[in-house]
Amino acid sequence: MNDNAYPLSRRRLLAGAAAASAVTVTGVAGAPTAAAATPARATTALVTRDRIATAALRAPDGTAAAVPFQADFHARLATWLAFWSANSPRAWSTPVQVVGRVAPAGDALTLHAIRYRRDDELRAGFAAGRRDASHTATLASLHHHFPSVRVLPDGTVRVGDGPAGFTGAPGQVAFAVAACRELWGDGDATAARWAEHAGRALARAGQPADAASHAGWAAFTRISLRRGLGTESYE
Protein backbone atom coordinates (compact mmCIF):
# COMPACT_ATOMS: atom_id res chain seq x y z
CA MET A 1 0.00 0.00 0.00
CA ASN A 2 1.23 3.47 -0.89
CA ASP A 3 0.89 5.83 2.08
CA ASN A 4 0.61 8.72 -0.38
CA ALA A 5 -2.81 7.45 -1.40
CA TYR A 6 -4.28 9.20 1.63
CA PRO A 7 -5.57 12.76 1.26
CA LEU A 8 -2.61 15.12 1.22
CA SER A 9 -4.42 17.85 3.13
CA ARG A 10 -5.04 15.58 6.12
CA ARG A 11 -1.48 14.22 6.12
CA ARG A 12 0.03 17.69 5.71
CA LEU A 13 -2.06 19.16 8.54
CA LEU A 14 -1.15 16.42 11.00
CA ALA A 15 2.47 16.26 9.88
CA GLY A 16 2.77 20.00 10.47
CA ALA A 17 1.42 19.62 13.99
CA ALA A 18 3.83 16.78 14.70
CA ALA A 19 6.72 18.82 13.36
CA ALA A 20 5.77 21.75 15.56
CA SER A 21 5.82 19.48 18.59
CA ALA A 22 9.21 18.16 17.51
CA VAL A 23 10.55 21.73 17.37
CA THR A 24 9.38 22.24 20.94
CA VAL A 25 11.30 19.18 22.05
CA THR A 26 14.44 20.28 20.24
CA GLY A 27 14.27 23.72 21.76
CA VAL A 28 13.97 22.36 25.29
CA ALA A 29 16.69 19.77 24.90
CA GLY A 30 19.11 22.29 23.47
CA ALA A 31 18.84 24.69 26.38
CA PRO A 32 21.94 24.92 28.59
CA THR A 33 21.82 23.13 31.91
CA ALA A 34 23.83 23.50 35.09
CA ALA A 35 25.03 19.92 34.97
CA ALA A 36 25.47 18.29 31.57
CA ALA A 37 25.43 14.84 33.13
CA THR A 38 21.91 15.29 34.52
CA PRO A 39 19.27 13.42 32.45
CA ALA A 40 17.30 15.80 30.24
CA ARG A 41 13.93 14.80 31.74
CA ALA A 42 15.08 15.72 35.25
CA THR A 43 15.58 19.36 34.20
CA THR A 44 12.92 19.70 31.48
CA ALA A 45 9.94 21.87 32.36
CA LEU A 46 6.49 20.55 31.53
CA VAL A 47 4.57 22.16 28.67
CA THR A 48 0.85 22.84 28.95
CA ARG A 49 -1.19 21.76 25.93
CA ASP A 50 -4.90 21.46 25.15
CA ARG A 51 -4.40 19.59 21.88
CA ILE A 52 -2.62 16.57 20.45
CA ALA A 53 -1.63 17.41 16.89
CA THR A 54 -4.78 19.09 15.51
CA ALA A 55 -7.20 17.25 17.84
CA ALA A 56 -8.65 18.94 20.90
CA LEU A 57 -7.88 17.17 24.14
CA ARG A 58 -10.96 16.30 26.20
CA ALA A 59 -11.22 14.88 29.71
CA PRO A 60 -13.37 11.73 30.13
CA ASP A 61 -16.24 13.93 31.41
CA GLY A 62 -16.18 15.85 28.13
CA THR A 63 -14.63 19.07 29.42
CA ALA A 64 -11.79 20.79 27.59
CA ALA A 65 -8.45 19.97 29.13
CA ALA A 66 -5.25 22.01 29.12
CA VAL A 67 -2.77 19.78 30.94
CA PRO A 68 0.98 19.51 31.50
CA PHE A 69 3.00 17.12 29.33
CA GLN A 70 6.60 16.12 29.08
CA ALA A 71 7.51 17.81 25.79
CA ASP A 72 8.96 14.70 24.17
CA PHE A 73 5.90 12.65 25.12
CA HIS A 74 3.58 15.24 23.60
CA ALA A 75 5.65 15.16 20.40
CA ARG A 76 5.42 11.36 20.23
CA LEU A 77 1.66 11.53 20.75
CA ALA A 78 1.34 14.00 17.87
CA THR A 79 3.37 11.71 15.61
CA TRP A 80 1.29 8.70 16.68
CA LEU A 81 -2.02 10.46 15.97
CA ALA A 82 -0.81 11.50 12.52
CA PHE A 83 0.11 7.86 11.83
CA TRP A 84 -3.29 6.61 13.04
CA SER A 85 -5.11 9.15 10.90
CA ALA A 86 -3.01 8.56 7.77
CA ASN A 87 -3.97 4.88 7.92
CA SER A 88 -7.67 5.42 8.67
CA PRO A 89 -10.44 5.27 6.03
CA ARG A 90 -10.62 8.06 3.47
CA ALA A 91 -14.10 9.05 4.61
CA TRP A 92 -12.85 9.88 8.10
CA SER A 93 -11.77 13.42 8.80
CA THR A 94 -8.61 14.35 10.61
CA PRO A 95 -9.21 13.44 14.30
CA VAL A 96 -10.95 16.32 16.03
CA GLN A 97 -10.90 15.04 19.62
CA VAL A 98 -8.72 12.81 21.76
CA VAL A 99 -10.45 11.84 25.00
CA GLY A 100 -8.13 10.83 27.80
CA ARG A 101 -6.41 11.60 31.05
CA VAL A 102 -2.74 12.59 31.36
CA ALA A 103 -0.68 11.43 34.35
CA PRO A 104 0.47 14.17 36.75
CA ALA A 105 4.09 13.66 35.65
CA GLY A 106 3.08 14.35 32.04
CA ASP A 107 4.62 11.12 30.74
CA ALA A 108 1.60 8.82 30.36
CA LEU A 109 -1.86 9.00 28.79
CA THR A 110 -4.92 6.88 29.52
CA LEU A 111 -6.80 6.89 26.20
CA HIS A 112 -10.61 6.71 26.18
CA ALA A 113 -11.56 7.69 22.62
CA ILE A 114 -10.47 9.17 19.30
CA ARG A 115 -13.19 11.08 17.46
CA TYR A 116 -13.49 12.30 13.89
CA ARG A 117 -16.22 13.92 11.79
CA ARG A 118 -18.15 12.23 9.01
CA ASP A 119 -21.30 13.59 7.38
CA ASP A 120 -21.22 16.43 9.92
CA GLU A 121 -21.46 13.96 12.81
CA LEU A 122 -18.89 13.33 15.53
CA ARG A 123 -17.98 9.62 15.56
CA ALA A 124 -15.54 7.43 17.46
CA GLY A 125 -12.81 5.74 15.47
CA PHE A 126 -11.67 4.24 18.76
CA ALA A 127 -13.79 3.82 21.88
CA ALA A 128 -12.48 2.14 25.01
CA GLY A 129 -15.66 0.20 25.73
CA ARG A 130 -15.98 -1.12 22.19
CA ARG A 131 -13.79 -4.21 21.89
CA ASP A 132 -13.76 -4.54 18.11
CA ALA A 133 -11.24 -4.52 15.28
CA SER A 134 -10.72 -0.77 15.62
CA HIS A 135 -9.74 -1.27 19.27
CA THR A 136 -7.06 -3.82 18.33
CA ALA A 137 -5.98 -1.66 15.39
CA THR A 138 -5.49 1.34 17.66
CA LEU A 139 -3.45 -0.81 20.03
CA ALA A 140 -1.27 -1.68 17.02
CA SER A 141 -0.72 2.01 16.28
CA LEU A 142 0.27 2.67 19.88
CA HIS A 143 2.65 -0.30 20.00
CA HIS A 144 4.18 1.10 16.80
CA HIS A 145 5.14 4.31 18.64
CA PHE A 146 5.51 3.45 22.34
CA PRO A 147 7.21 0.74 24.40
CA SER A 148 4.57 0.60 27.15
CA VAL A 149 0.93 0.02 26.14
CA ARG A 150 -1.45 -1.55 28.66
CA VAL A 151 -5.16 -2.30 28.30
CA LEU A 152 -7.05 -1.65 31.53
CA PRO A 153 -10.12 -3.65 32.61
CA ASP A 154 -12.56 -1.02 31.27
CA GLY A 155 -10.89 -1.07 27.83
CA THR A 156 -9.03 2.21 28.24
CA VAL A 157 -5.40 2.08 27.22
CA ARG A 158 -2.53 3.47 29.30
CA VAL A 159 0.43 4.56 27.19
CA GLY A 160 3.84 5.34 28.71
CA ASP A 161 6.57 7.47 27.19
CA GLY A 162 9.75 6.08 25.65
CA PRO A 163 11.29 5.11 22.30
CA ALA A 164 9.40 2.55 20.23
CA GLY A 165 10.62 -0.97 19.51
CA PHE A 166 10.07 -4.60 20.42
CA THR A 167 11.35 -5.45 23.90
CA GLY A 168 9.61 -8.76 24.53
CA ALA A 169 7.47 -7.25 27.29
CA PRO A 170 4.42 -9.36 28.22
CA GLY A 171 2.08 -6.61 26.99
CA GLN A 172 3.67 -6.64 23.55
CA VAL A 173 3.43 -10.42 23.28
CA ALA A 174 -0.19 -10.40 24.47
CA PHE A 175 -1.05 -7.79 21.85
CA ALA A 176 0.67 -9.77 19.10
CA VAL A 177 -1.26 -12.93 19.99
CA ALA A 178 -4.56 -11.00 20.08
CA ALA A 179 -3.81 -9.31 16.75
CA CYS A 180 -3.00 -12.64 15.09
CA ARG A 181 -6.24 -14.14 16.37
CA GLU A 182 -8.62 -11.21 16.03
CA LEU A 183 -7.31 -9.43 12.93
CA TRP A 184 -5.53 -12.13 10.97
CA GLY A 185 -7.81 -15.09 11.71
CA ASP A 186 -5.02 -17.22 13.18
CA GLY A 187 -6.83 -18.88 16.07
CA ASP A 188 -3.84 -21.08 16.87
CA ALA A 189 -1.60 -18.14 17.79
CA THR A 190 0.14 -18.61 21.15
CA ALA A 191 2.51 -16.63 23.33
CA ALA A 192 5.19 -19.27 22.90
CA ARG A 193 5.14 -19.09 19.10
CA TRP A 194 3.71 -15.64 18.47
CA ALA A 195 6.55 -14.55 16.18
CA GLU A 196 5.87 -17.46 13.85
CA HIS A 197 2.19 -16.52 13.63
CA ALA A 198 2.98 -12.82 13.16
CA GLY A 199 5.45 -13.80 10.46
CA ARG A 200 2.62 -15.42 8.54
CA ALA A 201 0.72 -12.15 8.58
CA LEU A 202 3.80 -10.27 7.38
CA ALA A 203 4.33 -12.75 4.54
CA ARG A 204 0.67 -12.45 3.61
CA ALA A 205 1.11 -8.68 3.40
CA GLY A 206 4.17 -9.09 1.18
CA GLN A 207 6.51 -7.87 3.91
CA PRO A 208 8.34 -10.98 5.16
CA ALA A 209 10.40 -10.24 8.27
CA ASP A 210 11.19 -11.45 11.77
CA ALA A 211 8.36 -9.92 13.79
CA ALA A 212 10.61 -9.80 16.88
CA SER A 213 13.11 -7.52 15.11
CA HIS A 214 12.88 -3.74 15.16
CA ALA A 215 11.84 -3.54 11.50
CA GLY A 216 9.55 -6.57 11.74
CA TRP A 217 7.72 -5.22 14.79
CA ALA A 218 7.20 -1.87 13.08
CA ALA A 219 5.86 -3.63 9.96
CA PHE A 220 3.57 -5.97 11.92
CA THR A 221 2.01 -3.16 13.95
CA ARG A 222 1.58 -1.06 10.80
CA ILE A 223 -0.20 -3.75 8.77
CA SER A 224 -2.33 -4.68 11.78
CA LEU A 225 -3.46 -1.06 12.09
CA ARG A 226 -4.45 -0.96 8.42
CA ARG A 227 -6.25 -4.29 8.52
CA GLY A 228 -8.11 -3.43 11.72
CA LEU A 229 -9.31 -0.05 10.43
CA GLY A 230 -10.26 -1.63 7.10
CA THR A 231 -7.92 0.35 4.85
CA GLU A 232 -6.11 -2.82 3.68
CA SER A 233 -7.29 -6.42 3.61
CA TYR A 234 -4.04 -8.03 2.36
CA GLU A 235 -6.12 -10.73 0.69
Image (cartoon, rainbow, N blue to C red):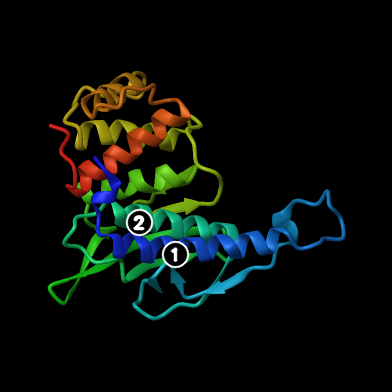
Q: Quadrant of residue 97?
A: bottom left
Crowding around mark 2 (Cα neighbors within 10 Å: few <14, some 14 to 19, many 20+) is many
Crowding around mark 1 (Cα neighbors within 10 Å: few <14, some 14 to 19, many 20+) is some
58, 71: nearer the viewer: 71
Q: Nearer the viewer, mark 1 or mark 2?
A: 1
Lateral position of residue 64 relative to residue 187, left or right: right
Lateral position of residue 222 relative to residue 37, left or right: left
Q: Quadrant of the N terminus?
A: top left
Look at the picture and state if 111 lies above or below 168: below
The residue located at (31%, 18%) in the rendering is 196
The residue located at (49%, 36%) in the rendering is 165
Which residue in the structure is indicated by mark 2? Answer: 156
166, 81: nearer the viewer: 81
Q: Is residue 105 visible?
A: no
- Kind of residue indicated by mark 2: Thr
Lateral position of residue 76 relative to residue 124, left or right: right
Lateral position of residue 186 relative to residue 70, left or right: left
49, 204: nearer the viewer: 204
Look at the picture and state if 90 lies above or below 190: below
Which residue in the structure is indicated by mark 1? Answer: 16
- Kind of residue indicated by mark 1: Gly
- x, y percent for residue 158: 44, 53
